[in-house]
Amino acid sequence: RGQAKELGRVLESLDPQLVSAFQGTRKFDLVARSDLKDVVLEQDLANSGNVDKADPSAAKSFKLAGAKFVVVSTVDDFQDNVQEADFKEIGKKATRRQVRLSLVAKIWDTTTGKLLESANLQLDNSDFVRNPEFLTGEKGSSLTEKALQEMARQMSERIAARVVDVLLPAKVLTVRDGQVTLNRGDGTGIAVGQTWKAFSQGEALIDPDTRSEE
């Protein structure tokens, strides 16, 4: 619908933002895939004879690390529309740009091939319409390109937080002098003002149909 340029900008931002969001959780060792060609080029250079092979820092071919989990993110809906309202009683018109991004994030266990989670996440520009940093007009009728980049950043952080919650659920580390310490920090979606409920782990329940623990 004539929105390929805008969608392309979002997709272009999503790739590096996802890498940054996962690295920011400090929970995973990331394996290069989108930047794999650059890693392979460095390995080719190391084998060209121009790099000291005795250098322990030299890149080595066929030594790429494997990945225990793979996260596949697919954009399933993108809307970037300008709506116009005609106030005939006062003889004025108003416009508003609405942007919506919907994405499905799937977490796969590469060892078993099992799908561990499939989450549908949505984001719109409602947080930006009154923020002058993302607007070119006072009334919020025109979003800057920076707003699309910000949507990609926020979506990436949501994906990373969801993956952390699924693979590494939040746990209480210590309770000391009335203060509770969790295994969560920057980059994991925790924020000042949140209210958490803590539960002790109970007896494992077995589903009679699947025979799996619930």
Image (cartoon, helix red, strand yellow):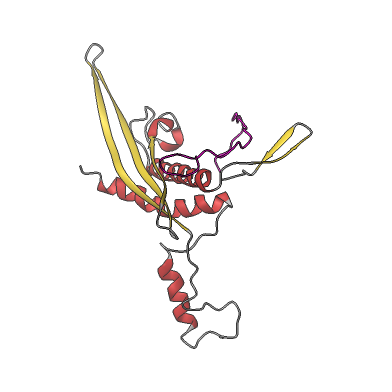
Magenta stretch: residue 183 in it?
Answer: no
**In what quadrant of the picture does the N terminus appear?**
top left
Q: Main secondary structure of the magenta part?
A: loop
In this rendering, position of residue 137 left or right of residue 84: right
Near-viewer residue (24 or 182): 182
Please tell me which residue is depicted at 55% across the width and 59% down the height of the picture. 29
Q: Seen from this angle, which residue lies furthest front?
A: 208
Q: Is residue 156 above or below residue 84?
A: below
**Residue 58 sits above or below residue 167 on the image:** below
Q: Which is nearer the eye, 61 or 203? A: 203
What residue is rendered at 48% in x and 66% in y? Answer: 66
For image coordinates 36% across by 37% down, the residue present is 143
- Dividing the picture into quadrants, the one containing residue 192 is top right
Q: What segment carries the magenta color?
A: 188-214
Residue at image coords 45%, 51%: 18
Expressed as whole percent of the image width and height from the top left, the position of residue 64 reads 48, 71
Q: How many marks?
A: 0
Question: Outermost residue, top direction?
Answer: 89
196 vs 71, left or right, is right
Q: Position of residue 99 (x, y in %)?
A: 33, 36
Q: Nearer the viewer, residue 14 or 140?
A: 14
Q: Nearer the viewer, residue 2 or 28?
A: 28
Which image quadrant is residue 140 in? top left
Q: Position of residue 13 (x, y in %)?
A: 40, 51
